[in-house]
Amino acid sequence: MYEGPVQALIDELGRLPGVGPKSAQRLAFHLLGVERTDAERLAGAILAAARDVHFCRRCFNVAAAEECRICRDAKRDEAVLCVVAEPRDVQAIEKTGEFRGRYHVLGGLIVPIDGITPDKLHIAELIRRLGEEPVTEVVIALNPTVDGETTASYLRRQLADLDVSVTRIASGLPVGGDLEYADQITLGRAFAGRTSM
Amino acid sequence: MYEGPVQALIDELGRLPGVGPKSAQRLAFHLLGVERTDAERLAGAILAAARDVHFCRRCFNVAAAEECRICRDAKRDEAVLCVVAEPRDVQAIEKTGEFRGRYHVLGGLIVPIDGITPDKLHIAELIRRLGEEPVTEVVIALNPTVDGETTASYLRRQLADLDVSVTRIASGLPVGGDLEYADQITLGRAFAGRTSM
């Protein structure tokens, strides 16, 4: 055991996901070695984020105000709503510059074995939004994994009776990928989703 | 780019060693998702460490007071001084329970190509200590790597004219390995089997 404040720092860093005891020690000694102002800036960023960052009351993206930057942006197309699992998915889609609509962040995927049932996600809020906002298309952009497929199927059933078209982002070969090394399911999807050119 | 405080947190976390942009994002969203008190405890531990942890004025180990716990401990054998590169090496050796003397932390290894010349390390302070304290044996416990060997050779030459026997830990540590990652038994054996140099 190190002396009090050193061990306390190692313990706290070790609670972060993916940070084991050795990494926590390495990070702690890094922080002990940098300028005190650098350590204070990191601590300040953590405190500011804990204090100022909320989830957007409308779409559940991270937000520094009551609503996130995208929900506040009047230039976004309010007819198209993209459903994602996590705020970082919003970020990934924004980077493409291909989407000008708004988002709805579920806060995860349905995984019953982990206790994540539909009522734990922001699905009721999604359905409420569809009744209040002039949305004509819901684009489902969930990971093409078992949990993502489960959640997408559930959403499709929930949205079936509403007056919106439900689409999902294409699954297929990644750009720059190699047909020879693609797995069978991906290649099968790429065939099923072929488009005219 | 995320909204202000989120991006600031990601940027600060990304400055940590071994934390790339994706890891920084993952850690940031973890911190945004935990209880606010948990985030505050981490920030508090960083601030407390930056404020309260110094380097022992005698041995340059990490210390919460002017001198570290080991230097303050009157029961330690002041005749044997163990020279290590980093505070975490002190920790690794303490865990073996094989050593009851005191330490001297160099603060690194001699690596001229990186600008780490002997004057950048606490070598002058080591020689001063040997003049002031009743040390009869100096145990060199540096990594058995090129940099460690270089530093050990330099120390042996510097200490040659002094009235102390110079030993080094030897058997047990695999060549090219890292002292920090050695298991306790191996490191303990290395201590028991130290040889004169």
Image (spheres, coloured by chain):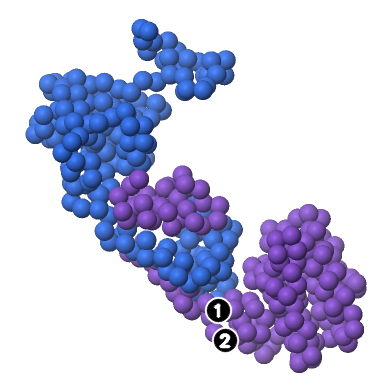
Chain colours: A blue, B purple
Q: Pointer 2: residues within 10 angstroms few (<14), some, or many (20+)?
A: some
Q: Where is residue A4 drawn, in percent x and y?
A: 51, 76
Labelled pair 1, 2 in contact (Cβ < 8 Å): yes
The x and y percentages for residue A166 are 22, 21
Kindly indicate the quadrant of the structure image that contains residue B183: bottom right
Q: Identify the element where label 2 is drawn.
A: loop
Please give the name of the residue rendered at 47% of the width and 22% of the height, measured from the top-left corner: A175
Query: Would you name the residue on which mark 1 appears?
Result: B54
Q: Residue at x 23, y 45 (%)?
A: A69
On screen, B196 above or below A85?
A: below
Number of marks: 2
Q: Are marks 1 and 2 on the same chain?
A: yes
Q: Is B107 positioned to the left or the right of B153 in the image? A: left
- Residue highlighted by disc 2: B66
**Badge 1: few (under 14), some or many (20 or more) residues near its Cα, within 10 Å?**
some
Q: Chain of mark 2?
A: B
